[in-house]
Amino acid sequence: YINDAFGAAHRSHASTAIIAKFFPKKKYFGLLLAKEIAFLEQAIINTNRPFTAIIGGAKITGKIDVITALFNKVDNLIIGGGMGYTFAKAMGGEIGRSLVEKEKVFLAKKLIAKAKEKNVNLLLPTDSLNSMSLRDFSNINTSSILSIDKSYMGLDIGRESIDKFVNIITSSKTIIWNGPMGVFEIKQFENGTKEIAKAICLATKKGSFSLVGGGDSVASLKKFNLENGVSYISTGGGAMLEYLEGKKLPGISAIMD
C-alpha cells in the first residue's frame, strides 16, 4: 500500500486511513507525500530565523488553531485578507460593509493578547483598499482599516500595510504562506496579494526557505507567474494547516503506526 495523497492526508477516509491497516509490513509513503513531510519539517523543526508566517483568506474560522499553534513557533505572524477586518473590529474600528465574523470578534481580541503574551510580532493591516462593490471600480479609495466609510467594503490591503509586510518578509529566513491578502481574482484588488507573493520570491532568491499552500495562494502564484520563485508549493491546504498545528494526520499515522 502506497499513499501519495498529501492533500487528503488530514481526512480519515477508507482509502487513506483504513486500507493501510491490511498491509502491516508493506505500507509506504509515496515520493510526493515524503517530500511534503520533509519540507514541512524543514519549516517548523529545522527552522532558520527569523521565521514569518503569513495567514490570509476570508475568515478566522478554520484557521484559529493554526494561528494559536504558530504563536509557539514563529517570530512574526502577518494577518491579511477578509479576516483582517474581524481583527480591525476587535480593535474598535469602523469597517463599513467589510466582511466580518461578528461571533469571532472576541476571539480576535484574545489572539491579539496571546501574541503579546508569547512575544510574537503580530502584524495586522493598518490601511485598506475599499470599494462600494466588487463590480463598481469608479469609487475605489484607501483609508485606515479602522475607519472605513459605512457605504464601503475593504477588498485588499493598502500601500502602508504592503510596505510593512514586505519589509518583514524580505528580512525573514523561513516563510510560510497560506491565504491571499484580498480579492486577488479581480485586477483592481490584486495588488496586496501580488506584492506579498513578489516579496516571498525575492526573499527566496536571497536564500530564504519559503513554503506556500492553500488553493488561493497557489492560484495567485500562478496568476502572477511566480510559481517557480518559491522553495516549495504544497499540494495540501487543509492538510498543511493541520500539520502546522501539530495534529496527527490520519493518512500519515496509518502508515507510521
Image: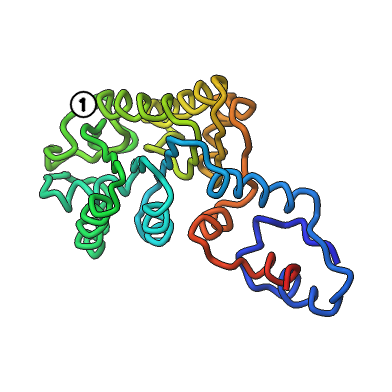
Q: Residue at x 43, y 35 (%)?
A: 50
Quarter of the image holding residue 21?
Answer: bottom right
Q: Which element is circle 1 on?
A: strand
Q: Is residue 192 left or right of residue 18?
A: left
Q: Residue at x 56, y 39 (%)?
A: 211
Furthest residue toward right: 26
Which of the pair 141/91 is nearer the observer?
A: 91
Image vertical order of residue 178 relative to residue 244, above or below? above
- Using residue 185 as the reference point, say whether residue 222 is left or right of it: right
Tell me the residue at 29%/41% (across/down).
121
Q: Position of residue 137 (x, y in %)?
A: 30, 27
x and y percent of residue 161 in the render? 28, 29
Callout 1 amino acid: Asn
Which of these two is toward me, 193 or 233? 233
Please determine whether, in this image, residue 99 is positioned above or below residue 173: below
* Left/right of residue 136 with respect to residue 213 in the rendered view: left
The image shows residue 196 at horizontal and vertical percentages of 43, 29
Question: On the image, numbered disc 1 is attached to which residue?
Answer: 141
In what quadrant of the picture does the C terminus appear? bottom right
Q: Quick check: 145 left or right of 228?
A: left
Quadrant of the rendered structure where residue 205 is? top right
In which quadrant will I find the N terminus?
bottom right
